[in-house]
Amino acid sequence: MKKQRPVNLDLTTISMPATANASILHRITGVAMFFALIFVIVVWAISLQSAEGFELAKQLMQGVIGKIIAIGTLAALSYHIIGGIRHLIMDMGHWEELESGNLSAKLAIAIWIVTVILAGVWIW
């Protein structure tokens, strides 16, 4: 017996609530931090090898790619911390209702955007 259910394969038409976006973003930033940590460790290791290695790492981090990676790393770290604090507050029994959960998710994303802009201005 076939079930005639509507199937929506166009993912751009699906509107997720702010809480879903916040949750997905928290997971994505966790994975991004893992990969950013690899870059940070490699550059750190190069800088500790010799004076020439330090200069190479310094030039790399002062270049456009280094700055973009630094801003991306700070963006991932800042949202993961903000989302983690939000989850800790929710674990204490606050912001568990639909309205306050959506508001806290929107607030966390707004704070993150401001933080990323400030980090970008600071690094660039």
Image (cartoon, grey):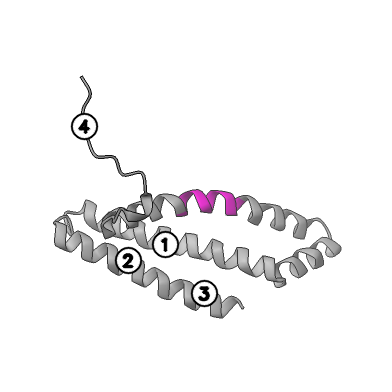
Q: Is residue 32 magenta?
A: yes
**Image marks 1 and 2: residues in contact by CB distance under 8 Å:** yes
Where does the C terminus fall, quadrant-wise?
bottom right
Q: Residue at x 77, y 56 (%)?
A: 46
**Residue assigned mark 3:** 119
Q: Residue 92 at what x, y percent from top left?
A: 20, 54
Residue at mark 4: 4
Viewer-proximal residue among 60 and 20: 20
| Dot placed on the residue nearer the N-terminal end, 4 or 1 | 4
Give the Cα separation between the discs numbered 3 and 4.
50 Å
Q: Quick check: 112 left or right of 45?
A: left
Q: For this view, does 88 lie left or right of residue 64? A: left
Question: How many residues crowd mark 4 within 10 Å: few (<14), some (14–19), many (20+)?
Answer: few
Residue shown at the point (44%, 73%) measured from the top left: 115
Point out the tag, 3 or 2, that comes first from the N-terminus: 2
Query: Which residue does the numbered mark 1 point to in the structure image?
Result: 79
Q: Whole-Å distance between the Cαs marked 3 and 2?
A: 16 Å
Evaluate if marks 3 and 4 touch, with contact meaning CB atoms under 8 Å apart.
no
The crowding category of the residue bearing disc 3, from other C-alpha atoms within 10 Å (few below 14, some 14 to 19, many at least 20), is some
64 sits to left or right of 77 = right
Residue placed under numbered mark 2 in the picture? 108
Question: Camera-side residue: 24 or 4?
Answer: 4
Stretch in magenta: 29-37
Q: Secondary structure at mark 3?
A: helix
Q: CA distance from mark 4 to mark 1?
A: 41 Å
Mark 4 and mark 1 residues within 8 Å of each other at the beta carbon: no
State the residue in front, 9 or 74. 9
